[in-house]
Image: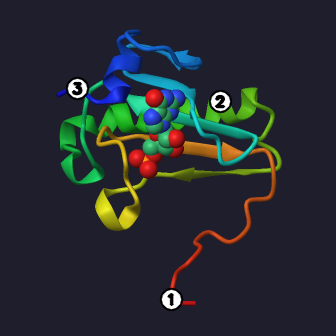
Amino acid sequence: MPTIFEKIIAGEIPATIVHQDDRVTAFRDISPQAPVHVLIVPNKPIPTVNDVGEEDERMLGHLFIVARDIAKKEGIAENGFRLIINCNKHGGQVVYHLHMHLVGGQALGPMLSGGTHG
Ligand code: 5GP
């Protein structure tokens, strides 16, 4: 079964695309947690970080370059932002197509909430 992100990448369901090339697609999160909340997604459907392979190294480096460029375009590079990749149940992953959250546009506060280790 293709994930919702595969359908967005293929243009089968709508999303606000901010970048697309032969390796990655970036679009605005449907439920933004900050003034800027963009998801940067490999076009290749890798389910989780656990499934990343050596052959993905260049594409994942490119994902960071795209994140850098989007942060600059969105005007949040200078003040700063956060990149998040959730993995599996404890990481809070909901969509099983690897993706990086780019969030910013305001002070984001502590890195984790609800933890029991300080
Ligand atoms: P995860 O918890 O898996 O790291 O995050 C999944 C993210 O995908 C969530 O922030 C959620 O709001 C976003 N999302 C889920 N479905 C859709 C959708 O159909 N369109 C868009 N643009 N974002 C989605």
Residue type at the position of mark 3: Pro
The residue where tag 1 is placed is 116
Residue type at the position of mark 1: Thr
The mark that comes first in sequence, 1 or 3, is 3
Residue type at the position of mark 2: Ile
- SS at badge 2: helix
Please tell me which residue lies in front, 27 or 73.
27
User: Could you classify mark 3 by the number of other residues whose Cα lies within 10 Å: few (under 14), some (14-19), or many (20 or more)?
Assistant: few
**Residue 35: x and y, percent?**
76, 41
Residue drawn at 28 percent across, 30 percent down: 3
The residue where tag 2 is placed is 70
Residue drawn at 20 percent across, 43 percent down: 54
Q: Nearer the viewer, mark 3 or mark 2?
A: 3
The C terminus: image quadrant: bottom right
Please tell me which residue lies in front, 21 or 41.
41
Q: Is residue 50 left or right of residue 102?
A: left
The residue where tag 3 is placed is 2
Cα–Cα gap, marks 1 and 2: 34 Å
Q: Nearer the viewer, mark 1 or mark 2?
A: 1
- Can residue 100 be seen in this snapshot? no
- SS at badge 3: loop
